[in-house]
Image (cartoon, helix red, strand yellow):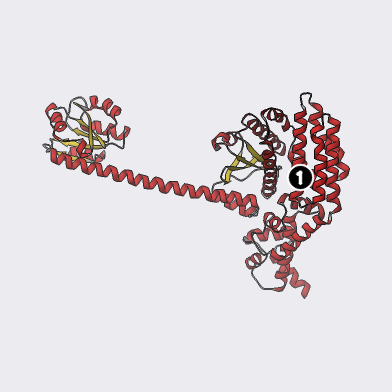
Amino acid sequence: MKKVFLVDDEIAIRQGIGNSIDWESQGFIYCGDASDGEVALPLIEKHQPDIVITDIKMPFMDGLELSQILRKKMPNIKIIILSGHDEFEYAREAIRIQVTEYCLKPVSSLDLLKILIKVSLKIDNEVMDKKRIDDLESKIKETKTESKDKFLYELCQGVYNTSEAIREATKFNIDLFSSYYSVMIIECTIESNQIDWIEDEFNCLRFSRKLKENIYILKGESKEQLEHATNILRERLHTHEDFNPDNALVFGIGRVEDRIQGITSSFSEADEEKNYSSIIHKYHSKETMSDIESKKELHHFNRRDLIDFLKFGSSKDIVSFSRSYSSYLQESKMHSPFTIYHFLMDFTITITHYLKETELNSLEMMQQISQIEVKASWIRHYNDTLSYMEEMLYLVTTTKESTNSKYSSFVQMAMEYIHDNYTDSQLSLQTISTAVNVSASYLSHIFSQETGITLIEYLTNIRIEKAKELLKTTKNKTYEIAEQVGYSDSQYFCKTFKKVSGMTTKQFKNFGRLQTV
């Protein structure tokens, strides 16, 4: 129902209009009246009417002056002016201040009701139009957000090269430039606004991959500064977990990288650590409250270090790594038997999950792990903790080293996949690692370790060598050759070709002709 307010200096008119219409049956509420604009203003602000009917000529403040004020302060109010003066100047001024209706006195109650119904329909139409516009804007905004999130996720997946990433970021008005990057993934059961402080306090790009999973591309001006920021985040997120055990946060943070292309590796590491954390969390969810209290001491180590050692460490480094990884247990005088037990269980579960991921979990291996694990509940001293860790790590590293050729086969498989698919402009570290069934971070590291160059450098070299062959043997244009070797951007191809070969494509063509003469 629409609320109507009347302003007229003649009491007989006010009473006549107020009593001549059955307001509620016609869909209106008569919410009040006043003798002039000055008296009317505070009452209008109080009652918030949808429609104001006002006379033009009144003492103190006339109807036009009142209408001007209402138009500025309450622009949604519809104004109907009643005038006993058939003068052009009044009508022109009423049009100028966008009065909804202008009619001459005397006006019958039936005519006034017709005008009110007309104005009421106009209000309804405006509300519907506004709702449609709001819905459309909301859908556009939602679509833009989805597209932006899709781009950032694809960036983390390694879909774009550097120039493509910058170009796409510009489309979405995303500030992608930074000296250093690190990716953090948080999977949580709490409302997302409870971690809004991350965006407020840290320089980052935030997006969602799926329900209750937030991904942050953290940015920093120096490696030290960004590593310090990730340490602070790790500590604060663990603190939240300690004090809110029912609203758990499972998260992972990747290493700091100095290039846009490094975002993929950092994302892979963060996702991997988050998956390990999820396994640990499921185990800890079965704890008693007394166990949870002791678990608060378990955030002095970074599980990422253990994962990296399992992947890349050797048996000769077991002793030094064990001491480094568990050093807080030796330094702390407050730890309880529960603390040691939980530390060793965290350690053991991480190893078990790693073995399953790398398909080293043979029946014999898992039986040996179980035999060592039995000792965990009886350990009370730091030296026994070290012995447990060393025994477990020795078992893993010796098994890994005895099957070392498997890791070389990953690299060989990656090389073969690149040779077969280098023409695909979407080829990336992520797609290659998926094809060879190993994590992107692991493939990146092992590839560099065995070949001396990064996987992306290897892919680039293959493409440029193929481009050289095409430049020598065909008359294809540069942009056509770029597409044939997997570059969707011919300018980026030319820049890369010169960087790798030391010549422009034109210079290389001319050089090739001279050699054949």
Q: Give the residue furthest to the right.
A: 316
Residue 463 picture quarter: bottom right
Q: Position of residue 392 (x, y in %)?
A: 83, 42
Residue 44 picture quarter: top left
Q: Position of residue 85 (x, y in %)?
A: 13, 36
Foreground of the two, 421 or 413 = 413
Write the residue at 76% across / 52% down: 359
Q: Position of residue 138 (x, y in %)?
A: 44, 46
Horizontal side, residue 398 vs residue 413: left or right: right
Q: Residues within 10 Å of mark 1 (few under 14, many from 20)?
A: some
Secondary structure of residue under mark 1: helix
Q: Which residue is mark 1?
A: 352
Indicate whether 263 appears above or below 23. below
How many marks can you see?
1
Q: Give the residue furthest to the bottom.
A: 517
Q: Quadrant of the C terminus?
A: bottom right
Write the residue at 72% across / 66% down: 466
Horizontal side, residue 361 vs residue 247: left or right: right
Residue 436 picture quarter: bottom right
Q: Quadrant of the N terminus?
A: top left
